[in-house]
Image: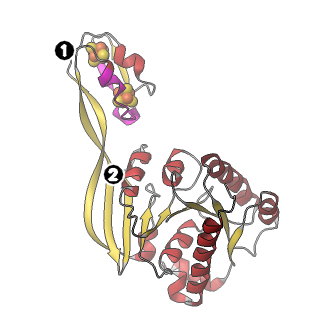
């Protein structure tokens, strides 16, 4: 089973839920930290990294000795990654989405494939827990290909927990597409509700079963609970705003390490997800 832990905005406790859930289960588990711009699951898990690999995307390399400046490549590029100035063809590799269209249309076979490094993947272990995360190169905008590579480590023999990036744009979709369940983490404030609405819209567009965890559940107001009731959105867990929990977080400790009673609560959360999927609840 693949569970993606997502949130409409950052700072809601998404990584807290993903890491504690991963460390509470009795089954074989892996955590795939797809929040590649700011991965921080490793800060709580302190895994031993066994391998590091670079991730590249394909970009065009143009042989100007063959180029006739016909503009066909410029015209097909929807991302404005190519332009011709006088008798020079310029490539803006940071804007290239690696679609390969320019190579296909070039009548002179003047374009070949080169590569650009967008980040790295680190793979390791924390005891029995399999750990993978991506780190996007500083200044790099193309995170979906790196997220895809992190997800390629998904092992069907294990329960995979994905820590998704915050928001509702392309990187989040890359971290949610094709998963079995999306666990949305929010807080009961008007800001939390605003971003939760967007996240629910995204996950419902993808048609993925989903449920809610309310973090810092005893602050704010009832707006999130009322919205959940209206939307038939199951609240699967609530984490209160407690000094002991905040202290564990600020010390980079897992909740389930500092307060072992939380292990059963996260196990219960997992069982609720399993049961909901088994029953085929119409949550999508
Ligand atoms: S590979 Fe696609 S996105 Fe990149 S320059 Fe060529 S046409 Fe544009
Ligand atoms: S399609 Fe080929 S020949 Fe035409 S401008 Fe582009 S690189 Fe040059």
Residue 146 in the magenta stretch? The answer is no
Can residue 92 be seen here? no
Q: Is residue 154 left or right of residue 215?
A: left
Q: Is residue 100 magenta?
A: yes
Q: Which corner quadrant of the image does residue 93 belong to?
A: top left
Could you give the CA–CA distance between mark 1 and mark 2, rounded to whole angstroms? Answer: 32 Å
- Identify whether 272 is placed above or below 229: below
Mark 1 or 2, nearer chain start: 1
| Relative image position of residue 19 (x, y in whole percent) | 49, 73
Quarter of the picture containing the C terminus is: bottom right
Instruction: Note whether residue 126 is visible.
Output: yes
The correct choice, above or below, for 74 with respect to 171 in the image is: above
Q: What element carries label 1?
A: loop
The residue labelled by disc 1 is: 66
Considering depth in this image, is 124 or 190 the residue closer to the camera? Answer: 124
Can you say whether 244 is above or below 147 in the image?
Answer: below
Q: Which residue lies furthest to the left in this view?
A: 65
**64 left or right, relative to 99:** left
Q: Position of residue 75 (x, y in %)?
A: 41, 16
Mark 1 burial class by Cα count in 10 Å: few <14, some 14-19, many 20+: few
Ligand 1 picture quarter: top left
Q: Quadrant of residue 122?
A: bottom left
* Residue 135 against residue 27 in the figure, above or below: above
Q: How crowded is mark 2: few (under 14 residues within 10 Å), some or many (20 or more)?
A: many
Q: Which residue lies furthest to the front in this view?
A: 279
Start-end of magenta stretch: 89-104
Mark 1 Cβ and ligand 2 under 8 Å apart? yes
Q: Mark 2 points at which residue?
A: 119
Q: Is mark 2 on a helix, strand or loop?
A: strand
Q: Please report the residue visible at 49 percent of the width from the left and 54 percent of the height from the top.
A: 175
């Amino acid at each position: 089973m693949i569970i993606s832990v997502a949130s409409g905005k950052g700072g809601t406790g998404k990584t807290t839920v993903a890491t504690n859930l991963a460390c509470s289960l009795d089954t074989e588990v892996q955590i795939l930290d797809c929040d590649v711009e700011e991965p921080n699951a490793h800060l709580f898990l302190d895994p031993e990294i066994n391998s590091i690999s670079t991730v590249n995307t394909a970009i065009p390399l143009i042989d100007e000795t063959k180029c006739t400046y016909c503009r066909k490549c410029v015209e097909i590029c929807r991302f404005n990654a190519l332009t011709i100035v006088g008798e020079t063809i310029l490539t803006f590799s940071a804007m290239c989405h690696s679609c390969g269209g320019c190579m296909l249309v070039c009548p002179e076979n003047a374009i070949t494939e080169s590569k650009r490094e967008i980040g790295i993947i680190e793979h390791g272990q924390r005891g029995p827990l399999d750990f993978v995360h991506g780190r996007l190169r500083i200044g790099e905008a193309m995170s979906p290909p790196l997220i895809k590579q992190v997800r390629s480590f998904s092992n069907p023999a294990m329960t995979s927990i994905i820590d998704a990036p915050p928001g509702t744009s392309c990187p989040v979709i890359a971290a949610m597409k094709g998963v079995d369940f999306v666990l949305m983490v929010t807080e009961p404030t008007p800001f939390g509700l605003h971003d939760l609405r967007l996240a629910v819209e995204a996950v419902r567009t993808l048609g993925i079963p989903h449920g809610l965890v309310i973090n810092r559940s005893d602050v704010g107001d009832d707006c999130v609970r009322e919205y959940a009731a209206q939307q038939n959105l199951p609240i699967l867990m609530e984490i209160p705003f407690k000094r002991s929990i905040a202290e564990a977080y600020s010390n980079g400790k897992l909740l389930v390490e500092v307060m072992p009673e939380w292990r059963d609560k996260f196990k219960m959360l997992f069982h609720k997800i399993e049961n909901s999927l088994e029953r085929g609840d119409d949550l999508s």
